[in-house]
Structure formats: C-alpha cells, structure tokens
Image: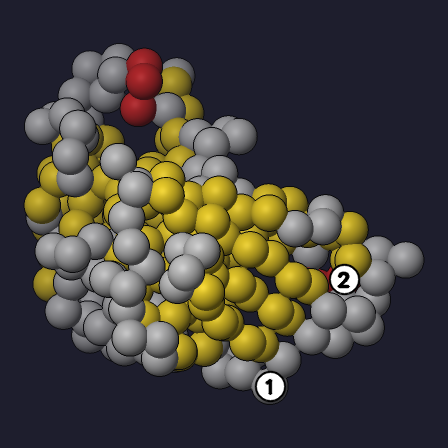
Amino acid sequence: EVQLQESGPGLVQPSQSLSLTCSVTGYSITSNYWGWIRKFPGNKMEWVGHISYSGSTNYNPSLKSRISITRDTSKNQFFLQLNSVTPEDTAAYYCARTAYYSYIYDSWGQGVMVTVSS
Amino acid sequence: EIVLTQSPTTIAASPGEKVTITCRASSSVSYMYWYQQKPGASPKPWIYDTSKLASGVPNRFSGSGSGTSYSLTINTMETEDGATYYCQQWSSTPPTFGGGTKLELK
C-alpha cells in the first residue's frame, strides 16, 4: 500500500523559502505523477504543481516564478521549494499521487500546516 | 484557468434524504473528479472520470454531467456522509478545484 508523508517546518518567515519533503513508501515515484496541493484557511484548494514519473515538472502559472519541485529517486522522495513567501502562502500543504487509471489524486499525505509569519 | 463553482456552499440533510451537489465549470471539461474531506483528515478520492466510484465508496453515491455542468448525488443521506466535497478538473492545466460544499447532518 502506498503511503505519503509530508515533512518540513511549520513556520516560515516572510520573504524566506518554504521547503517541504514528501516521503513515499510502497510505490516508486518513477511511476505516475506526484503533486503538491495546498488548502488555504477558509477551505480554498489550489494545485501547486507536480513532477512526473520521468522527472518533468509542471507548475501553477500563479506560482511559476517562485516554485521548484525536484525529486530524489534513490530515497523515493520529492520536494517542494517555494521562494519569497508571504502570509498569503499560509496553508496546509499536501503531497499526492495520481492514479494509474485516471488523473484523480488517489493517495494523499496527511498534510502539513505551514504558517508564514514573523 | 478554468474556474469551478460549487453550489450550494453548505447544505444540511436528514438521514434518508436525497442530496445533490453541483459543480459548474467556466469552460467545458471532459471529466470531473470529486473528493470527500472530513475535519483533520486529508481529501479522499470519491468519484473519478465523472461517474466512477472510487474504491470503497458506497453505491448510494453517483456522479454525472458533461460539458460545464456536473453533479454528485447521494441517493439516501447517511450520518457518515457529513463532510466537505470538492470537485476538480484536469482537462486543462492548471488543474483547479471548486470551493467545496459542506454537507451537514440535519
């Protein structure tokens, strides 16, 4: 059974970088698509971006200048870096996997709450 | 990007009642996906490719729609169905989510 686990700091200073790790067990990240999704206070959900089975990336245009998603296949992990954060980046960040049979996200991590504040 | 508008925002239903949640897209999409989320938990896949139930989803749920109008229906509301439901499209990038519909037990 695949399991995803996010990790990273819960508090980030404005203008600094947010760095999160998604550790995957039970399934190789060299298959499917692996995404980051965030949920803001107030329940709005936003797709942040993804990295594919081949290592190619696709980002939300609203974040494109600030974001980088990378991976380490030897550790079966992928990473999110979001630069120049503001309080508007405060959200719960989830990593997730697309299904092999559809583009629905069929497995999710438990999420990590990140607050941007001084 | 495609904007998804869910209605209603909040709904209260009694056990046994039929419930319908609507998701309208600003442009035509090929498929709609639905998730269920309960407080403190991550979203769960609920309906994929518009009408197919994800693993473990009770068959009192159904999905339908095409073009710009999609819906999730619960044939007979049960207590455990109280949650927030989100629609999502990926017919164009970026994938986008609806604002969510909170379903409460009356």
- Amino acid type, callout 1: Ser
Q: Picture quarter containing residue B53?
A: top left
Q: Nearer the viewer, mark 1 or mark 2?
A: 1
Q: Position of residue B64 (x, y in %)?
A: 11, 50
Among numbered discs 1 and 2, the one appearing first in the sequence: 1
Asked if residue A85 can be seen in this view, the reply is no
Asked if residue A52 can be seen in this view, the reply is yes
* Secondary structure beneath label 1: loop
Which residue lies at the image location 18% right of the left edge and 30% below the top edge?
B57
Between A37 and B78, the one lying in front of the other is: A37
Which residue lies at the image location 41% right of the left edge and 60% below the top edge?
A74
Classify 10 Å Cα crowding around label 2: few (below 14), some (14-19), many (20 and above).
some
Between A91 and A23, the one lying in front of the other is: A23
Q: Picture quarter containing residue A68?
A: bottom right
Q: Is residue A63 above or below residue A88?
A: below
Q: Is residue B21 above or below residue A101?
A: above
From this viewpoint, which residue is outermost toward the front?
Answer: A74
Q: Is residue B74 above or below residue B2?
A: above
Question: Circle 2 sits on which residue?
Answer: A87
From this viewpoint, which residue is outermost toward the bottom?
Answer: A65
Q: Position of residue A99 (x, y in %)?
A: 21, 53
